[in-house]
Image (tube, rainbow, N blue to C red):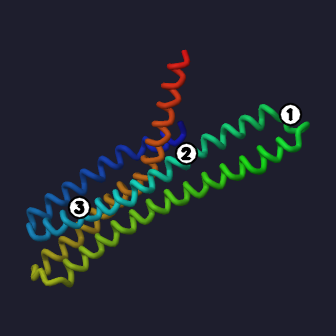
């Protein structure tokens, strides 16, 4: 529930950021069709790279969520069976040592891997953006300096909106994974009734 609630504020920010990027692209197409086309290609390439990385990141975050659920189930078993664990040393070592340690380690590894992939996704998008700026400023396009300077200024404003959109994607992905888990539990409860 917390992950879903954390993701909700990002939805309007993503929509506003996407709208600003769209308006910027239309403006650039009007000012200079060549620059607008180059920007559209760069955005398409950046989004494709981002999606390629983030799909893998979401897979790892899903695995981390499954392990987190297993970890909470183990914590529940430990708290409900404290008396048994005090009496049975072998069971205590099995639950507290092996099961909890393994589950916590897998959860940590999957979370770190998933978030690292999202970080790589953002970095690949920035690489494409700065390559576009380099081509516009120093490339062989032969554009008037007024168009180049205005375009670079507009793109610098647009990248902050695009970055805001991309910043929220991992949080929205975690929220989507958590929501899917909640739906699965609700379905299981409704079947059991």
Q: Categorize mark 2 by other alpha carbons within 10 Å: few (<14), some (14-19), many (20+).
A: some
Image point 42% across, 47% down: which residue? 172
Residue with the mark numbered 3 = 44
Marks 2, 1: nearer the viewer: 1
Q: Which mark is residue 84?
A: 1
Of labels 1 and 3, earlier in sequence is: 3
Question: Which quarter of the figure has residue 57?
Answer: bottom left
Q: Earlier in the sequence, mark 2 or mark 1?
A: 2
Q: Quadrant of the C terminus?
A: top right
CA distance for labels 3 and 2:
30 Å
- Identify the element where label 2 is drawn: helix
CB within 8 Å, label 2 to label 1: no
Of mark 3 and mark 2, the one earlier in the sequence is 3
Vertical placement of 192 versus 80: above or below?
above
Residue at 24% in and 74% down: 132
1 and 3 marks in contact (CB < 8 Å): no
Which type of secondary structure does the marked residue at label 1 adopt? Answer: helix
> How much space separates mark 2 and mark 1, taking CA atoms?
28 Å
Q: Residue 141 placed where, x, y %? A: 12, 80
**Residue 46 location (% of width, % of height):** 29, 64
| Residue at the outermost top position | 193
Give the answer, above or below, for where 17 lies relative to 29.
above
Can see residue 5?
no
Left or right of 2, for residue 88: right
Q: Residue, x 31% and y 59% (percent of image)?
A: 162
- Rendered location of residue 143, percent (x, y): 10, 79
- The label nearer to you, 1 versus 3, is 1
Per the rendering, the mark at residue 120 is none
In which quarter of the view is residue 117 placed? bottom left
């Amino acid at each position: 529930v917390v992950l879903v609630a954390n993701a909700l504020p990002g939805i309007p920010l993503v929509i506003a950021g996407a709208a600003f990027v769209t308006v910027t692209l239309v403006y650039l197409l009007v000012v200079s069709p060549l620059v607008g086309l180059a920007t559209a290609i760069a955005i398409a390439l950046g989004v494709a790279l981002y999606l390629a990385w983030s799909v893998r990141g979401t897979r790892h975050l899903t695995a981390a969520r499954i392990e987190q659920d297993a970890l909470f189930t183990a914590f529940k078993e430990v708290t409900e069976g404290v008396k048994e664990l005090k009496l049975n040393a072998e069971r205590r070592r099995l639950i507290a040592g092996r099961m909890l340690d393994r589950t916590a380690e897998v959860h940590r590894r999957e979370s770190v891997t998933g978030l690292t992939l999202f970080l790589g996704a953002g970095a690949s998008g920035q690489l494409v953006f700065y390559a576009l700026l380099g081509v516009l400023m120093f490339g062989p396009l032969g554009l008037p300096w007024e168009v180049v300077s205005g375009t670079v200024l507009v793109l610098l404003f647009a990248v902050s909106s695009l970055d805001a959109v991309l910043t929220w994607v991992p949080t929205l992905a975690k929220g989507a994974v958590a929501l899917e888990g909640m739906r699965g539990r609700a379905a299981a409860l409704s079947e059991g009734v």
